[in-house]
Amino acid sequence: MTRAIVLVLDSFGIGSAPDAERFGDAGADTLGHIAAACARGECEIAGEQGRSGPLRLPNLASLGLYHAHRESTGGWAEGVAVPTGITGRHGFARELSSGKDTPSGHWEIAGVPVRFDWGYFPDKQDSFPSALLDALVSEAGLPGVLGNCHASGTEIIARLGEAHVTSGKPIVYTSADSVFQIAAHEETFGLQRLYQVCETARELLEPYNIGRVIARPFSGSTAADFARTANRRDYSVEPPAPTVLQKLHDDGGEVIAIGKIADIYAHCGISRSVKASGHDALMSATLAAIDESGERSLVMTNFVDFDMVFGHRRDVAGYAAALEHFDAMLPELLERLAPDDLLILTADHGCDPTWPGTDHTREHIPVLVSGAGLEPGSLGARATFADIGQSLASWFGLPPMDDGESFIAISTRSHRTSDHSTSPGGL
Ligand SMILES: O=P(O)(O)O[C@H]1O[C@H](CO)[C@@H](O)[C@H]1O
Ligand SMILES: [Mn+2]
Ligand SMILES: [Mn+2]
């Protein structure tokens, strides 16, 4: 069967990109700094869900993660056990897109870099233009808004959540990303009402070139216990050109989107979307999709907690534990794959939990490719995330994308388009 499974470990960068300085991120290294903190004994978590000591990712390591990180940074991650033999193709890729945000990263992975500049809101009190907020208040029938600044989403609900519940004014905030985020209490404000306000904001933001509006519902009764719920919803603009997802879908293939994937691609080129919250549920949904999917299927999953729960929160130990948990789930995934399935593990940007601030970091992403009967080895430095999209186009026998260089050999592509039944061998 010609199938591909793409797992995006949201924010799992493997070393500072050549243009990181432009973002204030020169030296950022999500994997490297987590490994170093673990090696120093700074990531101890007691209890059953806990972790201790050096970072242990044996399955990702076998696929070539540490080798890819070394190619990206010039040195081995501290304290890790480097495997003697590796089973996958491993490399790293840099980003062509102008931003270090989630949609840019995902669209570039799917073959469409974002060459234009997104709109951003300045980092000051009153970040948003008053004309925009006045229109939102009037069109959505709001008593006003709170926030109107850059913020960390958990910090701002602790700070303004009680005032929101009392006043009925939603909390609007942004970040270094091209986003307009709206936090509101799920019960007192209402989830459906929050979604409606986000849809109104999405329309009003059209002239501002903003990538995403994000609904950030939360629950709880006081500042001490306010917590965001799983009902986050992203309202993205559409990718600027058809992605490889769209091309496969239009060519009769099936694209199964797990987690945030459908929202990130603005539901373009998606055959079926499965929502799930938490990495266990996301992996279960991925396994179910693999079991159910047939010929010419792409299963694509975003593992968001690395970014949302640990990276942005600068929780180094939590990020390490989440990586180790993900790693422990990999053998079951590998067992479920058919011998000629193509598996790609990658990321969309960095979010170094040791870095100042709470924003993403401009980093290389890992490109770990396995299955499909391929020989282990290095894919080296890839000039764009779009090499993944181009490779998927090759794999599915689609016309080439405008960007990216396939790491699937031409002979393999012609072989696959003429005969889907035989294992292709060479990638
Ligand atoms: O702090 P929270 O609300 O998690 O926001 C984070 O999530 C958004 C999307 O990645 C970004 O704007 C980032 O700042
Ligand atoms: Mn992301
Ligand atoms: Mn993020």
Image (cartoon, grey):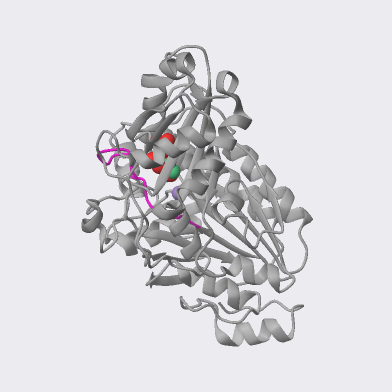
Rendering coords of residue 185 (x, y %): 53, 23
Residue 284 found in image quarter: top right
Q: In the picture provided, is 239 more to the left or to the right than 414?
A: left
User: Closest to the observer: 202 or 372?
Assistant: 202
Quarter of the image containing the C terminus?
Answer: bottom right
Residue 364 found in image quarter: bottom left
Q: Is residue 52 in view from this perspective?
A: no
Q: In the picture provided, is 24 more to the left or to the right than 94?
A: left
Rendering coords of residue 307 (x, y %): 44, 42
Rendering coords of residue 95 (x, y %): 37, 64
Q: Is residue 21 in view from this perspective?
A: yes
Overall secondary structure of the magenta section: loop
Q: Residue drawn 32% across and 38% down?
A: 358
Quarter of the image containing the N terminus?
Answer: bottom right
Q: Residue drawn 51% across and 55% down?
A: 237
Q: Identify the magenta region.
A: 346-359
Above-or-below relation of 10 to 170: below
Rendering coords of residue 28 (x, y %): 27, 50
Residue 295 found in image quarter: bottom right
Q: Residue drawn 58% across and 50% down?
A: 263
Q: How many marks?
A: 0
Ligand 1 falls in quadrant:
top left
Q: Residue drawn 40% across and 58% down?
A: 365
Q: In the picture provided, is 64 more to the left or to the right than 29?
A: right
Above-or-below relation of 6 to 247: above
User: Closest to the observer: 275 or 263?
Assistant: 263
284 part of magenta stretch: no
Above-or-below relation of 343 to 305: below
